[in-house]
């Protein structure tokens, strides 16, 4: 999912801090972020004529396990010494396996790995890698379940739904949770206070109690009504007023910030643009989410559309929300970081994702490590993997790459430390809602495989940008055209 990974904050625990940290590259500063449609997957550079040499040679008498780094985080210069030190510690911890790390720049990592796989020279371990990076090599990954069963690997320290998150139909258990970035609502407390409105629910499944003390189910209908009350024009009228002027909006109530049509659709429930037979589809609930967004842009006016997305009053270091003129957004844990929220001049907090038709879906970004089917020594690779993800050693890698630990037993200390280091003067952050969000992860994931990934991505982004900038679009016709075009792309890929 894109080239947005950036700005690792090197603290005891650090948080990957830019869009799609689970799958992108790692530049040293945040890339500019879109307000209505995301950038496409980075164009992959041509593979080098020779794969980079491993940084270590295998010691005689040991089984060599190659570890490929570059599909996600890890190829940035600052991470390399720490990764090499981790390898040295592992190799010193036992005398049977020699772990050999291969670090490849993200710009060429996809092509390099593809070349190695095609040549029958695949590494064993790959990671950290997100869903989009993983699914760029669909069918190449080893099902870990037989190894989990063989070695009786204990998964009890992970949320069961998060374990299921890595279960892929007809492919198996493709990963064990490592670093995660759940999603939730972030809201501007000052704007709620100014409007005299109660804050969104602090717990998933809890009702919203409105300004009159009436309990309301926290669902999309309630969110819409609340967001309209928080959308204000230059004369102080909100979007529920007959005097509201949509051409003079100065404050918006809602935005699914920094995501794409698949992420927008997943707000209403998990799904895919690919059906079980490999054909193009538009899930009904995704179409409903897109229509809800389109109406929010051009009819109900509580979501910034394309033109408003570029307005000066919505620009901030962390995009529209950090401007102080957007009341609520839905976004991932990587956004709760000093680069986005450290210098804002308003108070904020975290709240629960609302339900759609009784179901809550909080889309997930996540990094893990996979073992390739071409690995000649899967048992030894699994031993390395379990060392990496163990309670005793996983924090070493989390410190290198950033992210919230997937292990439940590590999360309490993580939030305490992260709060102290990133927001030392803010003591009321509702971290519990982040933990809860793990149970509502989307499966299939919104970044999962599609045929002709890049071409498909370009087409649905074209569709989305058109809607975001066209107030009188024929929504039904555009959706039908999108599905037809996707089918042509899928057919050509067969």
Image: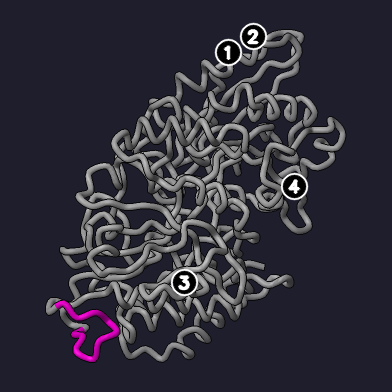
Classified by dominant secondary structure, the portion drawn in magenta counts as loop
Mark 4 or mark 3: name the one nearer the start of the chain: 4
User: Contact, CB < 8 Å: mark 4 with mark 1?
Assistant: no
Question: In this figure, which residue is indicated by the disc labeled 1?
Answer: 88
What percent of the width, then of the height, locates residue 271? 61, 68
Tell which residue pokes out farthest to the right in this image.
Answer: 150
**Figure label count:** 4
Compare marks 3 and 2 and give the one earlier in the sequence.
2
| Label placed on residue 238 | none
- Reading the image, the residue beneath label 2 is 92
x and y percentages locating residue 378 in the rendered image: 78, 31
* Residue where numbered disc 4 is placed: 173
Q: CA distance from mark 4 to mark 1?
A: 29 Å
Q: Which mark lies nearer to you, 4 or 3?
A: 4
Identify the magenta region. 236-245
Helix, strand or loop status at disc 3: helix
Side (left or right) of 192 relative to 287: left
Return the residue nearer the eye: 178 or 448.
178
Q: Earlier in the sequence, mark 3 or mark 1?
A: 1
């Amino acid at each position: 999912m894109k080239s947005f990974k950036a700005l690792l904050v090197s603290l005891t625990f650090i948080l990957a801090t830019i869009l799609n940290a689970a799958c992108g590259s790692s530049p040293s500063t945040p890339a500019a972020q879109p307000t209505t449609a995301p950038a496409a997957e980075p164009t992959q550079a041509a593979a080098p004529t020779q794969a980079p040499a491993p940084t270590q040679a295998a010691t005689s008498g040991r089984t060599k396990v190659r570890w490929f780094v570059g599909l996600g985080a890890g190829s940035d210069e600052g991470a390399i010494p720490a990764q090499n030190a981790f390898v040295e510690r592992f190799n010193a911890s036992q005398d049977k396996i020699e772990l050999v790390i291969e670090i490849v720049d993200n710009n060429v990592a996809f092509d390099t790995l593809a070349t190695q796989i095609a040549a029958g020279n695949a590494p064993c371990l790959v990671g950290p890698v997100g869903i989009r990076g993983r699914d760029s090599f669909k069918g190449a990954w080893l099902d870990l379940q037989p190894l989990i069963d063989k070695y009786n690997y204990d998964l009890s320290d992970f949320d069961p739904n998060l374990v299921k998150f890595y279960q892929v139909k007809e492919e198996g258990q493709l990963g064990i949770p490592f670093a995660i970035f759940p999603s939730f609502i972030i809201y501007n407390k000052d704007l709620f206070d100014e409007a005299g409105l109660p804050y969104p629910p602090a717990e998933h499944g809890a009702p919203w109690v409105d300004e009159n003390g009436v309990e309301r189910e926290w669902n999309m209908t309630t969110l819409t009504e609340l967001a309209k009350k928080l959308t204000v024009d230059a004369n102080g009228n909100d979007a529920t007023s007959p005097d509201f002027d949509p051409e003079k909006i100065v404050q918006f109530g809602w935005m699914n910030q920094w995501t794409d049509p698949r992420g927008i659709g997943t707000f209403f429930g998990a799904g895919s643009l690919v059906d079980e037979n490999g054909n193009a589809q538009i899930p009904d609930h995704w179409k409903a989410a897109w229509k809800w967004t389109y109406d929010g842009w051009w009819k109900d006016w509580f979501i910034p559309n394309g033109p408003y997305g570029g307005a000066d009053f919505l620009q901030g270091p962390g995009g529209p929300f950090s401007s102080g003129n957007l009341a609520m957004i839905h976004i991932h844990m990587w956004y709760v970081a000093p680069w986005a929220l450290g210098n804002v001049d308003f108070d904020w907090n975290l709240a629960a994702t609302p339900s759609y038709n009784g179901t809550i879906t909080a889309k997930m970004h996540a990094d893990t490590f996979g073992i390739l089917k071409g690995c000649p020594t899967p048992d030894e690779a699994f031993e390395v993997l379990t060392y990496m993800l163990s309670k005793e050693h996983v924090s070493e890698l989390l410190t290198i790459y950033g992210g919230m630990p997937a292990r439940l037993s590590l999360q309490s200390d993580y939030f305490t430390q992260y709060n102290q280091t990133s927001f030392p003067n803010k003591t009321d952050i509702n971290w519990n809602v982040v933990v809860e969000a793990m149970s509502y992860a989307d499966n299939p994931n919104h970044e999962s495989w599609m045929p002709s990934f890049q071409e498909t991505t370009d087409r649905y982004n074209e569709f989305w940008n058109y809607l975001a900038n066209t107030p009188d679009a024929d929504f039904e016709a555009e959706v039908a055209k999108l599905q037809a075009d996707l089918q042509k792309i899928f057919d050509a890929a067969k």
